């Protein structure tokens, strides 16, 4: 699975977890803090039902030739 090339938006449903959004989108929990920061979240554990979570694209550092 590749990284997203555009911002994805998820609407939070009851029981949703930020960690699962990050794993589903990036397959890497190292992006958890960055996603929380982009979304101005005060907590990594609590998501407000009905709110939207933005999952931004990842900038590529590779140079293809």
Image (cartoon, rainbow, N blue to C red):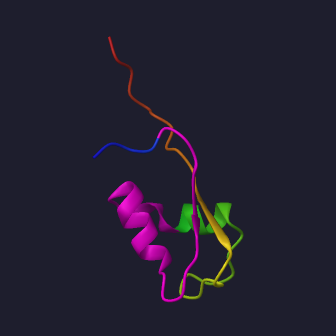
- Residue 13 part of the magenta segment: yes
Q: Tell me where residue 32 appears, x and y as whole percent.
A: 49, 67
Figure quadrant of residue 13: bottom right
Q: Which residues are magenta?
A: 5-32
> Looking at the image, which residue is at 45% across and 34% down?
60
Q: Is residue 63 above or below residue 24?
A: above
The answer to whether residue 48 is left or right of residue 13 is right
> Looking at the image, which residue is at 49% across and 44% down?
58
Q: Nearer the viewer, residue 8 or 60?
A: 8
Residue lying at the far left of the rendered structure: 1
In this view of the protein, can residue 40 be seen by the observer? yes
Q: Tell me where residue 20 appears, x and y as whole percent.
A: 40, 73
> Looking at the image, which residue is at 49% across and 38% down?
5
- Residue 10 part of the magenta segment: yes
In this view of the protein, can residue 29 be seen by the observer? no
Q: Is residue 17 above or below residue 62?
A: below
The answer to whether residue 49 is left or right of residue 45 is right
Q: How many marks?
A: 0
Q: Tell me where residue 4 appears, x and y as whole percent.
A: 45, 44
- Say which quadrant the C terminus sits in: top left
Q: Is residue 64 above or below residue 38?
A: above
The answer to whether residue 44 is left or right of residue 40 is left
Residue lying at the far top of the rendered structure: 65
């Amino acid at each position: 699975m590749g990284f997203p090339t555009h911002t994805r938006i998820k609407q939070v449903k009851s029981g949703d977890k930020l960690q699962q959004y990050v794993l589903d989108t990036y397959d890497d929990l190292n992006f958890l803090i960055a996603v929380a920061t982009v979304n101005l979240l005060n907590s990594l554990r609590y998501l407000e039902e009905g709110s939207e979570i933005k999952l931004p694209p990842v900038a590529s550092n590779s140079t293809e030739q």
